Image (cartoon, rainbow, N blue to C red):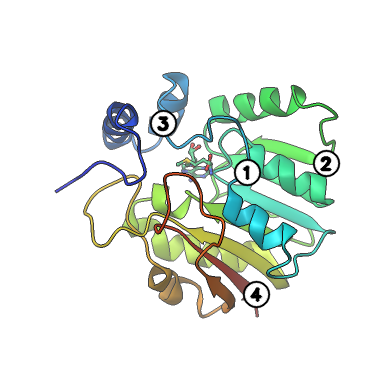
Amino acid sequence: MTSAAPGAAAGQNEDIHKLRALIAEDETNGWDKAWKEGRTPWDSADGSVRPPLRELIEDVKFPIPRTGRAIVPGCGRGYDAAWFARLGLETWGVDISPTAVDAAKIFVAAMPDPPENVYFKALDFFNFDVPEGKFQLAYDYTFLCALPPKMREAWGNRYGEIISPGGLLIALVFPIDGDRQGGPPYSLSPETYVPLLSDAFERVYLKKPGRPSEGREGKEMMSVWKRK
Ligand SMILES: C[S@@+](CC[C@H](N)C(=O)[O-])C[C@H]1O[C@@H](n2cnc3c(N)ncnc32)[C@H](O)[C@@H]1O
């Protein structure tokens, strides 16, 4: 059974069903069609970074580099990428949807004192030229859960390719909602990541957020993986 997504307000469920239909119809362009139609039920309404990420970094739950290059795959409207850029990292916000990338550029341009070190690129995460020196940090939130499970192995391998040794992958696990069938979002758990990442990464942090995202309480876990 394909049920509605957890943490979704009643009004969002129509968007979720429409989004699923668009992606089922057209795996290649479905996301861009969803962006064009404004079917973006995951979007942070006020463009703010989710509390678990703020907690990890602001409360120094785990030390994160402030130099080097970061990537936010499936960056959507770009608020997370802009935030990493403000921390000091050259940040790539990557999204397969050109419409999302345009929205991210507009979002950042409208910020007071917008960061200059954030670059939004319409790219397929699985197929772009990795810059020299690779990435020292990646943030994955609502990206793995957006992908069909058949893509998971490639997802893990790709992070192994693009993150330099010693680099970190911050993976905010969501939605943790049992074995619900169908998606996106597809159900995840911290264990989902273990076979995907363990060859190339070591898990160095796993905790339930003390500052959960509104409406997603109990359905998120923060994890950090270090590239071997
Ligand atoms: C559920 S949304 C999450 C957006 C953002 N992380 C957030 O939380 O607001 C997933 C995003 O991944 C993008 N996406 C899907 N497949 C992709 C791919 N292969 N490469 C890059 N982006 C992709 C979609 O266009 C969409 O913007």
Image depth: mark 2 or mark 1 in front: 1
Mark 4 lies on residue: 227
| Amino acid type assigned to the residue bearing label 1 in the image | Val
Depth check: 19 or 42 in front? 42
Badge 3 amino acid: Asn
Q: In this view, does 138 lie above or below 121?
A: below
Circle 1 packing at 10 Å, graded few (<14), some (14-19), many (20+), is some
- x, y percentage for residue 145? 40, 52
Provide residue 192's location: percent of width, then percent of height: 38, 69
- Are circles 3 and 2 on residues that touch, CB within 8 Å? no
Label 1, label 4: how far apart the Cα atoms are: 24 Å
Residue underneath mark 1: 49
Circle nearer the N terminus (2, 1): 1
- Residue sticking out furthest to the left: 1
The residue identified by callout 3 is 29
Q: Residues within 10 Å of mark 3 (few under 14, many from 20)?
A: few
Q: Residue at x 67, y 68 (%)?
A: 168
Specify the label residue 117 is tagged with: 2
Give the answer, above or below, for where 117 lies relative to 208: above
Left or right: 188, with 53 as reference point: left
Q: Is mark 1 on a helix, strand or loop?
A: loop
The numbered mark, 3 or 1, whose residue comes first in the sequence reads 3
